[in-house]
Amino acid sequence: MGFHIVKRDICPLWKRCCFYLAAIVAALFIGALVLLAIGVDPLEYYYQMFTMGMVGNRIAYKTVMNYLRDFVPLALTSVALSLAFKMRFWNIGGEGQFIIGSITASAVAFLLGPSLPMWLTVILMCIFAMLAAGLYGLIAGFLKIRFGTNETLMTLMLNYVALYILYFIGETKESWNFFLQEGSLRPVFESFASLGSFPSIPIGDKFQLNICVILTLLIGVGIYVYLKYSKQGYEISVVGDSMGTAHYAGMKVKRIILRTVFLSAALIGLAAAFKVGTVGVLSTSITNDVGWTGIIVAWLAQLSTPMIFVVAALICVLQTGSITAAATFSKVDSSFANMLQGAILFLILAAEFLVRFKIVRVKKGEKTNE
Amino acid sequence: MEQYAIQMKGITKTFGSVVANSNINLTLKQGEILALLGENGSGKTTLMNMLSGIYKPDSGSISIFGKEVSINSPEDSKKLGIGMVHQHFKLVDVFSAADNIWMGKEKPGLVLKKSRYARIREIASKFGFDLDPEKKVYNMAVSEKQTLEIIKVLYYGAKIIILDEPTAVLTVQEIKKLFDVLRKMKQEGHSIIIITHKLNEVMEISDRVAILRKGEYITTVETSKTNENALTEQMVGRKVDLNIDRPTVDKTSPLLEVRDLSILNDEGSVAIDKVNFYIRGGEILGVAGIAGCGQKELCEAIAGLRPIQSGQMIHKGDNIVGLSPKAITEKGISMSFIPEDRLGMGLAPSMSITDNMLLKNYRDAKGPFIDRKRGRAEAEQVIKSLEVVTPSTETPVRRLSGGNVQKVLPGREIKSGPNVIITAYPVRGLDINSSYTIYDILNKQKLNGVGILFVGEDLDVMLSLCDKIMVLCHGKLMGVVHAHKATKEMLGLMMTGSLDLTKEKSHGIAKDTLFKDVLVSADAPETAAQAEEEISNSGDKEE
């Protein structure tokens, strides 16, 4: 008597969805146990979390706007990371590239904003943020193709370099440092909302749809087409699949690697420009960990561009929701979302096993070698 | 009733919906050598893996020396006295031979004792092996590694030894040595199962032959009462002509000429050392040599994937040294190299057949997008003409079985209409049926006037398929011989460097060379021309 693990041929889509749903439910169940242990009613908590406190709230539109403000950088960063991942270039440096992008975009706003019209400032913010972040990403790409260094380590370390540059800017009160408020004694970041902010399209009488949301969706479609149908996308797939084959086919592998890494990092820079151009002020936690969360999103979506948008939307619900819920339930910190996120990732990966294999029971009576 | 060393009854094993083994019965007598014969994907390795504890059967029973057993792990298998020598060696490179053997010991203690070398030397000499127990694995040749694997299983007291395609990587002389050892082991009372695709080896070494076809057990026959044709018929399920054709074609002037070519390998040492050869249209030039003596570097250099150190390569009179791989492809030179893992170069395994068809011509499409319609049409054409078994054109190449993967590659190369085909190990690991399909493909190309460089492993095949064979040893040219005049022994000697024909006269320089300026030093041109004349004269007489 016993069990066998048997490989599946194909797993139908509905079954796969069931497995993933079950994984999410199981993760929520684990979360519920934790909540119960703290002494919080899990049903009420989850209700608050998933509705993001919008039900019966007169400023619900604000919640949606805040939600989208978090969603845009996460979705765009995840899409950008998936570009590099598809090529099996492990860009762990989303955080660093995002920081460099946001510093550059802010600098453009401070330096050029006063003398240029807002629309031009905003465009320049995007371009320079993309260039700076792209070049920052290229460091790891260049070292890899030139010296064969490990891009995982390089991009990881460059995250800290970028982070400490940001800290340095944020804490150095000197006359050259135009990032900080002039009047304040303590170092505080100056707002540039009046110099470089992305425009919004009013929908209804209160809700404002930031143009970044539309741009992000358009870029998502663009990247989907790029990866799936373009020659360059084809090259990315081949290089990711087999470097030897790419050489053999006469592809200029090094150039493809550099090009793709630049594009990946530049899009993260653009995400950063969107972010600072929406909130209008730099901060030491400007990334909101999108460089890390983006990795999780890209993998949960299995690098499929449409799925990245779905997963990013769900993860954002968790994050925004837990902050709202934390206001009602003072016992539960908003970091609860992180725990839940971890549990979901873990269980989705476990569900992946069931997608690939099935467990069958060996029937009694049949003669086996058990 | 005779007691069997192994008796497998009604063994069935499925992977998903694929039935790898269906109701298989197999017996191995004590002290015999049983050959296990079957095409690719007929379930030989799966069956053997159930004996070595890697898989468990879904149903059926296994008895070892008359006792029904359950083998749940490789450890169980070892305890039962079964030892398997896998096709891909399982050794730690940085360890010495002795330490590789010791590694698997159950209670090795804390201290490595000097005496371990003596113990292992003892076993080696008992069976007539030639192995230095203190030698590190990374310094070993392929045959030595195999010897080590065999000693390893003997050390753990294996009474039943399974060898999975042991001869695939050996030279003729080494195979002879291996067979001597196997016979000695048989005399000592060991029972041996040997998996091989080569029928002549089956006839030579085995006492009985068990045949599998598409996961089903066909029969077991006494080797002395059968012959190669009968075995093939049982294995394939229909009559197969075992003769490889060598059609004669009017040869054209040299298509590809290589002069004094030297190439470095990845480590920076000389891989190809001042080699001369040429290929005419309508001929197949074989390249024989022990694995890793510069074949890969040679193929890569011709395809423009590897810089050359010195020398010249001309194609139809045009220099191709320094051209990009793309430019060389455009000249009509196609290179396909099947590495040991069969997928490393030439195919993108996770991509579909359609996408793989586009690999070399995706740039031709206008605009920034690739032309999948064209790829799909080409994929359909290749699937149809080469009988590739696949669910659809969109199936990732990785999912296809070995034989079908290997048809996709030449299929793509040939449809681009090349005039020179460089092909390395195109039948590596393929069964007889698929191999013959590949030979047919090559012969058809030859009839169309294509010049083919065939880097091969199986000397029998090369002797009957190729027109000429050039032999390499450690990157040096040992000579170019006419296949219908050469013998296996002679090639074997040349491959190991014991026979060097180039010492007597130059080889591999065409009489009607397209080299405009003959760059050979003052005294050489005469001898070179003479040599070529002699070769072609003697060749003509025979033809």
Image (spheres, coloured by chain):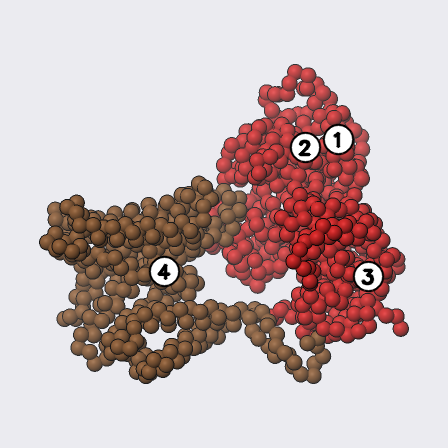
Q: Nearer the viewer, residue B98 or B388?
A: B98
Q: Residues within 10 Å of mark 2 (few under 14, many from 20)?
A: many
Amino acid marked by disc 4: Trp
Residue B224 location (% of width, % of height): 88, 57
Color used for chain A? Answer: brown
**Which residue is at a point 41% across and 71% down the rendered structure image?**
A344
Pointer 3 with pointer 4, Cβ within 8 A: no
Residue pointed to by mark 2: B476
Q: Residues within 10 Å of mark 1 (few under 14, many from 20)?
A: some
For this view, does A36 lie left or right of residue A368?
Answer: left
The span from disc 2 to disc 1 (Cα, nearest Å) is 10 Å
In the rendered image of this protein, does residue B309 appear above or below residue B440?
above
The span from disc 1 to disc 3 (Cα, nearest Å) is 41 Å
**Which residue is at a point 60% across and 45% down the rendered structure image?**
B337
Residue pointed to by mark 3: B191
In the rendered image of this protein, does residue B528 appear above or below residue B281?
above
Residue pointed to by mark 4: A292
Dividing the image into 4 quarters, which one contains the C terminus of chain B? Answer: top right
Element at label 2? strand
- Which of the marked residues, 1 or 3, is nearer the chain's N terminus? 3
Question: Is residue B434 something that shows in the picture?
Answer: no
The span from disc 3 to disc 2 (Cα, nearest Å) is 41 Å
Figure chain in red: B
